[in-house]
Image (cartoon, coloured by chain):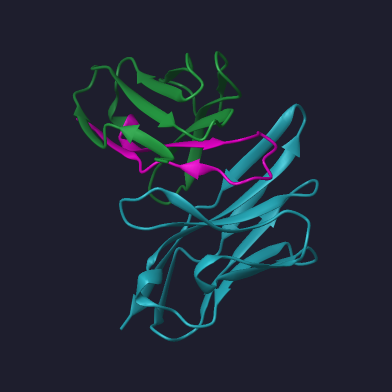
Amino acid sequence: NAGVTQTPKFRVLKTGQSMTLLCAQDMNHEYMYWYRQDPGMGLRLIHYSVGEGTTAKGEVPDGYNVSRLKKQNFLLGLESAAPSQTSVYFCASSYTGTGHEEQYFGPGTRLTVT
Amino acid sequence: AQSVTQLDSHVSVSEGTPVLLRCNYSSSYSPSLFWYVQHPNKGLQLLLKYTSAATLVKGINGFEAEFKKSETSFHLTKPSAHMSDAAEYFCVVSDEITGGFKTIFGAGTRLFVKA
């Protein structure tokens, strides 16, 4: 049982380049989330999904797109990377979306945009 | 409106001494409260959670937290710090809003443990 996995672990992009971050979970969770973590700011929600084929915007969605074609996978895309998107990105999942249960986190992807 | 404030950005203790990480929150309804721990270069791991049951919540690795509604606090404590406790700790509040729920993470408290 791998839990939540993320690929890649590290990436360096030049301004304007694009990339996709992959999140996979093997716990049959309905809800999946993408967060970014910046120093002194905790985690902020980028986008989330309440089930296969659905996505919704979070607190800081601008510059990102997501897709959930399969229940176990949640992809985060950056179409044209900017230095402000330098951050650590975490994927998480939960069985329901009541907000009263634990979220399970992946190990993170450290992205640097130069 | 929801908010969560971790009152200390850094806390330093000696090994074997008590740990206190402070968290205050504001919420409109009946929130759930969580503490997560993040070790260097790792994802977040749940330490404990409060979801309207017992106000004193025990978690993993000897940590506990007490929900005090009158003080709107959910401080994290441990009687005796261990070197392996050195990490960043996040207080999280989750509450119902119109159409769903909202989860807010505190800015984090980094715990240093001195030998």
Is residue B82 something one can see in this rendering? yes
Which picture quadrant has residue A16?
top left
Which picture quadrant has residue B58?
bottom right
According to the colouring, which chain is green?
Answer: A
* Viewer-closest of A93 and A19: A93
Q: Is residue A111 magenta?
A: yes
Indicate the position of residue B41 as horizontal and vertical percent values: 30, 51
Q: For the C terminus of chain A, which image quadrant?
A: top left
Indicate the position of residue A49 as horizontal and vertical percent values: 56, 24
Indicate the position of residue B5 as horizontal and vertical percent values: 59, 57
* Viewer-closest of A25 and B51: A25
Indicate the position of residue B14 as horizontal and vertical percent values: 38, 84
Above-or-below relation of B6 to B61: above
At a point 45% along the width and 50% down the height, the residue shown is B44
Magenta-colored span: A85-114
At a point 45% along the width and 18% down the height, the residue shown is A66
Is residue A59 something one can see in this rendering? no
Left or right: residue B67 versus residue B62 is right
Left or right: residue A17 versus residue A61 is left
According to the colouring, which chain is cyan?
Answer: B
